[in-house]
Amino acid sequence: MTDLTPRNSGHEVDDQAQQRSELETVRDVERYPVPDPGLPEHLPRLSDVDEKAADRATRQVATMFGLVPVLAILFVVIYFAVPRDAVFLGQNAKNIGLGITAGLALMLIGIGAVQWGRQLMDDHEMVDHRHGAASTKEDVEYVLRELDAGTDESGIRRRKVLGYSLGGALAALGLPLIVSFADLGPWPTKRVRAATIEETIWKEGIRLVHDVTYEPIKASEMVIGQLVNAQPENLQEFHGTEYLQEKAKASIIIVRMDPNDIKIPEERRDWQVGGILCYSKICTHVGCPISLWEQQTHHLLCPCHQSTFDLGDSGLVVFGPAARALPQLPITTDAEGYLVARDGFSVPVGPSYFERDSRGDFKGE
Amino acid sequence: MAKPAPTVQGGQDIEAHVPQKELGPVFKAASGPARWADERLGIATLSRPFIRKVFPDHWSFLLGEIALYSFIILLITGTFLSFWYKPSMAEIEYEGSYQLLRSVAMSESYASTLAISFDIRGGLLVRQMHHWAAALFLAAMLAHSLRVFFTGAFRKPREINWVIGVAMLGVGLIEGFAGYSLPDDLLSGTGLRFVDGLVRSIPLIGTWAEFFVFAGEFPGDLIVSRLYIVHVLLLPAILLGLIAAHLALVVYHKHTQFPGPGRNEGNVVGYPVFPVYAAKAGGFFFIVFGLLTLMGGLMQINPLWTYGPYNPAEVTAGSQPDWYMGFVEGAIRIMPNWEWHIGGTTWSWNVFLPGVGLLTGFFVVMAIYPFVEQWVTKDKSEHHVADRPRNAPTRTAFGVAAMTCYGMFWIGGGNDLVATQFRVSLNAVTYFLRVAVFVAPVIAFIVTKRICIGLQRADQERLLHGAETGVLERDPSGSYSERHAPISVGEAYTLTQYKQQPALLPAQDGDVKAKEMRVEQLRRRASRFFFIDDLRKPTRAELEEAAHHGHDDDHALTDGHEGNGHSGNGNGHHSIAAGTQQNVVDQ
């Protein structure tokens, strides 16, 4: 306790307050079974009593600071001298060099400063007195009195309409503020939804093509167990944003399974060609493209959240957070034997949304 | 050891020690530019209360500092990145120096991120520093909030600062998400696709929110530039404001301190801002900065050139969000597939509840906890001495239960990796976690509470019987006992100074107004749930009595050691150490 006072210069240690707060721990028997014994005696560090130790610490700190300019120069050298594509241990050499020099330089400043603070700066602890967070009584009284006077002077007490009308005026400003955001995007009215999220570019006669090469797919070339990632042939007509928007809905997977191994509902008999079935690739959960194909079980697993669909059973969900079957695209072959769509999707593809009419989804037999 | 002579001081300290006679370099500066500035700004008056302001020292107080420093480093590195990054979804053909993506069509934002990574010298370093700093920022905030929670530092008068902290954590989460969506690579696009599904799932307004956020159908052509301004202006400005308020309140309330001799509710003991705290905290900034720079140089993060540009028809297996989104990701993964189809509408609970619901719930529960505890205790006093977690067993147990719940969700975020790395069934992992998110926190709660009470007992042993010395003695009758040494007064004060909350017996008629009865009974039941198992701390009289008997009160190694003068309560041991004396008060 007494050890603290010599450190005080300019800093207001309120000794009385300190004694008061210690006294409180003597008086409050219930809370403090043991009264505050006060601060323990300050123990000197080695660097306090041994000038050599202090000198050693000084040298350490100065060395750390002294290495920083060296590292800074090295950084500049590496910046200009090391080629961009130089490789060190399989990684970009320039990046490693810049990182090590700059990182060490920064760390040395930091470690040096902390070492200085710990070993060489005076380490006597100091005490500050706390005061409650609440304002003093006088302050509260003054502010209330003056606010009251000010309110009177403003005249609002007698002419209340001023306050009401001002409040109403400010509140009314909220209206234009909110309305101004109405053009953040097109409004998803029934008509807009039908032309966007409920519509894909699939329609009757559109060829199924490989998703990278755009080559059409012959039914006879697909073998049992094979999965092909595909797109509609007319996707090529789109570019930029529209291309991404259409691709995000139209992507499909084509699988060929042994027709005797799988369940094909009566109404979907003519949606497939000899065990070749086509499904939307977009997960009905949150819209990831699904492509992890378990050939033996006919299961398709979404890599994002592991929803699993049984492609041998009309795309029904067998596991995971997805709630609806994968929409199936009815397909057939054209005169040349290439796979084409028999029609568009019968239900909207992709994740659920509030206005989605989910009564038309396939729910099993 | 002799005490050091006060003159052995560095030059920096002269101001503090030497009065008028020998003026230090500070005083020379004061007559020149400092006076010029003071005559215009009054800096002496401004800095007077702060220059020697005391900050208590404890390693756990550094967690908040790490968060603050990571934020500053994020501002610095982020500004650097913004000089080259183009927030545009316009499609271009890549012509940069990364051979494998030459001539590939991609958005300008992805191309400019590749340019930062390959063509701007030091760009990759700063980009990786920025990403590491973001991960550290969130981690430090979360760790800091745990420290504040477990030490009860959210109690009056700091509740508002706790809420500000929770807000920062929430804003930080969104800020981080917005940031890693900007490069417009395959991974970040997959994240955006997920957000699209999440926004869509909101009942009633989901589709409208989706169209407004993405300016139409996903992905639209504005989301990257919108997220950019959110990421570099809107949210950082909010964070900056919240940080300013947070720090201002820390200064106003003064920092909490851990209990110890000389430390009480009325004071704060530590080192002055100038020079010790400035050196340590300032130095620590450079250490964090240096560490992040080394990480940026040596540890690869988000190698987005390997993912390719965003393509809605592709995704890589093992796609993961940044770590802080992992718990939401996990919830989304392990959620059962509940969906309602009512008439022509779809209610997507399988996405909405774990996504929007969990995120909201997480922050709401965090934000209201201080007020719940305060309602239970009706404790209106200020608390400046941090609780030792064991002395608030139920709170500590709640905290660990929450961490466990979070951890289970977080594991769920990598259920596919758990399955592949440990060669277990993915389905089994998922089913297990569906149960574990509810059961594991309960187990954690019970275990933590017992551990806390066990630690309280250990404290009481030390208080009443002293510390074990390891010296065994045999008395003439042949029985063995261990000699105990009394603990210091300082330690005894440290162990006992906390404010014990009583468990309340049910209210009787007339205790409160009839219409408040139900609420009061509920509160009292909650207080029993919270505090009835706490070990009642010894009173001053009991401690004095124990000290009086202390000299011959060595612990026998055999059971049934009795007759040492303590008021037994029938269980053959000291009443308090045995803990059967309940912490109940009929108020």
Image (cartoon, rainbow, N blue to C red):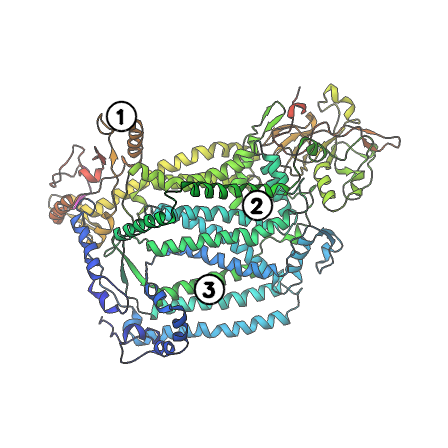
Disc 3 to disc 2: CB gap under 8 Å: no
The chief SS type of the magenta part is loop
Q: In the image, B180: left or right of B8?
A: right
Q: In the image, B173: left or right of A293?
A: left
Label 1 sits on residue: B514
Q: Is residue A356 above or below residue A105?
A: above
Do circles 3 and 1 both sit on a common chain?
A: yes
Q: Is residue B233 magenta?
A: no
In percent of width and height, residue A137 lies at 26, 51
**Label 3, label 2: how far apart the Cα atoms are:** 29 Å
**Label 2, label 1: how far apart the Cα atoms are:** 53 Å
- Span of residues in magenta: B554-559
Q: Chain of mark 2?
A: B
Q: Which label sits on residue B286?
A: 3
Asked which secondary structure carries label 3, the reply is helix
In percent of width and height, residue A235 lies at 78, 40
Please report whichever mark, 3 or 1, sits nearer to the chain's N-terminal start: 3
In percent of width and height, residue B262 lies at 23, 57
Q: Give the residue type that dot 1 points to.
A: Ala
Q: Nearer the viewer, mark 2 or mark 1?
A: 1
**Closer to us: A42 or B368:** B368
Please report whichever mark, 3 or 2, sits nearer to the chain's N-terminal start: 3
Number of numbered markers: 3
**Closer to us: B181 or B554:** B181
Label 2 sits on residue: B321
Q: Give the residue type that dot 2 points to.
A: Pro
* Crowding at mark 2 (Cα within 10 Å: few <14, some 14-19, many 20+): some
Q: Is residue B297 above or below residue B431?
A: below
Q: Is residue B279 above or below residue B338?
A: below
